[in-house]
Every structure is written in C-alpha cells, then in structure tokens.
Image: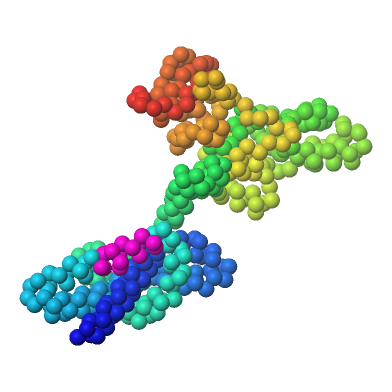
Amino acid sequence: MSATLVIVAVVIMVLLTLSALFSAAETALTGVSRGRMHQLEKDGDRAAKRVNQLTDDQETMIGSVLLGNNLINILCSALLTEVCSQAFPGAWGVVMATGITTTLVLVYAEVLPKTLAIGRPDDIARLLSAPILLVVKVFGPMIRAIQWVIREGLQLFGFDISPPADASAAQEEIRGAVEYHHAEGLVESRDRRMLGGVLDLADMDVSEVMIHRKNIVMLDADLPPRDFVDQALEAPYTRLPVYRGEPDNVIGVMHARDLARAVSHVRGHVETLDILAIAREPWFIPDTTNLNDQLQAFLRRKSHFALIVDEYGALMGLVTLEDILEEIVGEIDDEHDARMEGVRRQPDGSVNVDGVVTIRDLNRAMDWQLPDDDAVTVAGLVIHEAQTIPEPGQTFIFHGHRFQVLRRQRNQITALRVSPPLEGVVEG
C-alpha cells in the first residue's frame, strides 16, 4: 500500500509540474512582446519563430493550453480524491482532497508559475514554445471545432467576434508603450518626443507647420537684376518665392545655387540676367495635405520646398522638408539660423510668449502638454478657449496653465505670459 502511495504522490507531483508549465506558458505567451519576437525572428532566433507561430493564432493556442491544463488538473484532483477517500472514508475524504488539491494547484500550479511568467514573459515564452507548439498540434483540431461551434452559436444571436482591423490601434499601442517606458524612466524625453512626432505626422496638416505668408521672404520679378541679386543674397534662405505684381501671384522659386551659377556664367554682367529663366517652377499643394503624405511627396520629387494654397487658390504659406523633419527631431539650426524666438523664460518659472509661437514649439521648449487640436499658435489657443479676442491684462486658466494677455494689436494677440502647470486650480 505504501508503494502505491509513493507512486501516486510522484504522479501527482509530475502532474502539478506539467500544470505549472501550462500556466506559465499561458501567461507568457499572452504577455509576450510581439515586436521583440518579430525582431528576434528576423535575426534568426528559432524559439522566437515558434512563439510567433503560436501568437499568430492566439485563440487556438490559448484553447489548447487551457484544455491541456484542465485535463491535468482534473486528473490530479481525481487521484487525490481516490487516495484521501481510502485514508478517510466518507465525506471527510472528499473534503480533504478538495482542500489539498485547491492549495497545491493554486500555489504551485497557478500563482507561482504565473508570477514568474509575468516578470519575464519573453524568456519563458521562448523556453516553452517547443512543447506548447506540440500541444497545439495535438489539440488544435479539437479546439478549432469548438471555436466553430461557438462562432456559429454567437452569430445566431447577432454577435461577431472577429477582431476588427484597425491601423490606428497599432499606433496607439506604440504610443502607449513609449509613454509607459518614459514614465518608468527607460525612454528619455527627447526620444519620446521624436517617436511621438513620427506617429503624429499622419494626423497633422501642412497648415499646422507652415511658414505663414506674412513671414515669407519673397522677391519681386520686376526688380532690376542687380537689385534682385542683392536682395536674394541678403535673404537668410536658399529658396525664395518669386512674384510679379502682387505677392499672391507667385511665378517661380529662386534657388540661391542656381542664381550664383547664373551670375558666374555672365561674369559679373548681372544686368543681362533673365530672372524668370533661372527660377524654377513653383509647386503648389493644398492646405489639407497631411505631413506624412507631403514627406513622401518631397522624397519622390526630390524637392524640399512647396507653396501652400487654400481651396480658393490663395497663398497661405510655405512648407519645407526641414519643417517636417523638425516635427520629429525638434529645431534644426545651422550657422544662418537664429535660435527659436518668441519664448522668454521668467524667474518665476513662467514664460513670455509671442502670439505667433506655435503650441508644438512651446511644448517642445518647455516639455508641456498643451493641446494643439483646435489651434496652431498660442494666441489661437487662447482665442479658441475664451471664445473672444481678449483685452490686454485679461487672465484665463486653461488646461492647467494661466494665460495672461500682455499685448494686442487690432484683432491679434501679440504677447502673452503663460504659467507653468498649476496644481489644484479649477479652470475657467
């Protein structure tokens, strides 16, 4: 009798071990990093390839693991019940078997392995991928049959459990992972902004990053050639729109390199230059073009400069390849660029901001989170939230910051003071 008990005890321990492995595999395979596994598979990791095979059909994998785990737990419970019933006849044997089985399964076959799997899901998933893949191959046909019955039954009541294909969900998952790791201190603020900037391109229009027409340096095609060259050389940019008559009538784009080459060709006889022959054809794009599409268009056309027009064809501004890249990496300054103007830090932690400063530039400079969905500039945000054009001296609290209007010219807010994030302040 004692030999039989020893054998049963060994069998029960083996069953509990198998149950623990199933539990660890279930937790690890559902919590594994899909991105890391795909990268490891590309690097030639066979275990990662098996993990990807399992997670590609996650429903079948989970069903097979649960089926195997339940079979083992039920068999373990039955053996313990048989042993306890012989040792303690009657109801007490069943009660003791239930208590012992529950304790052993809960501690050693559920909580312990799942806790380990939560801590290192990638490593445990790779370690157990081979035996679990074998289990899926054995139980897979049965699980698929069960799934078919479940789906058909749910469809009778109008339920569709097919997962929807949603590209935005993938982006939100990436964004959430970046924010989580940043909060944990594993991703630096600069890297977080860069990764977020890449994801934001498809959600932003060129009108949100353009240089407004009021700030565009333009050249008059009717100027004498020498005056035209002098103004082009004094400009801080290498590409300049050329207009005739009025600024809205852009007829070309002058590249400084083309102009320099032409001046060199005429050997100083600038008066003989044909300005329009040197200028390149302008490229006009609608203001609703999103940044991701425009970035791809720049790459296809091998061009860095486009003029933006509204639905009526009126010139709104211009956008360059550098403007789009700056949405990802931040300000790109060269030896001819001035540092970002319009944001002046104050000793009390607030900043004096020019009204034309964009919200994204202010967020980058101060590491703030002001929303830019309804306005592009800081002045536009205040006007949108206040639903009026405020007077100098008026103060508002929006989105956890205090905005004080410092200057206004006609209908335009030209300067504001913005406080750092406030705590315990009711907006209004």
Left or right for 236, reference 325 = right
The N terminus lies in quadrant? bottom left
**Which residue appears at 51% of the width and 48% of the height?**
186
The x, y position of residue 390, in whole percent, is 44, 18
- Segment colored magenta: 104-117
Residue 226, image quadrant: top right
Q: Which colour scheme is used?
A: rainbow
Q: Residue furthest left?
A: 90
In this picture, residue 102 sits left or right of residue 426: left
Does the magenta portion include 115? Answer: yes
Residue 95 included in the magenta stretch of the image: no
Which is more toward the observer, 115 or 390?
115
Say which of 35 and 68 sits in front.
68
Any part of residue 15 in sight: no
Q: What residue is shown at x 58% (from left), y 68% (from top)? A: 43
Residue 388's image quarter? top left
Residue 415 on image: x %, y %: 53, 20
Which residue is most to the right? 267
171 on left or right of 27: right
* Secondary structure, magenta segment, majority class: helix
Q: Kindly give the residue lying farthest to the front in the view shown.
A: 2
Q: Look at the image and tell me whether residue 210 can be seen.
A: yes
Q: Where is residue 69 in the image (x, y as percent from the top left)?
A: 29, 73
Residue at point 23%, 78% (across, down): 75
Q: Which of 375 and 14 is in front in this view?
A: 14
Q: In this view, does 84 lie above or below 203?
A: below
Q: Where is residue 74 in the image (x, y as percent from the top left)?
A: 22, 75
Task: Tell me the quadrant of the picture where the C terminus can be found.
Answer: top left
Residue in view at x 33 percent, y 74 percent = 18
Q: In the picture provided, is 81 more to the left or to the right than 307?
A: left
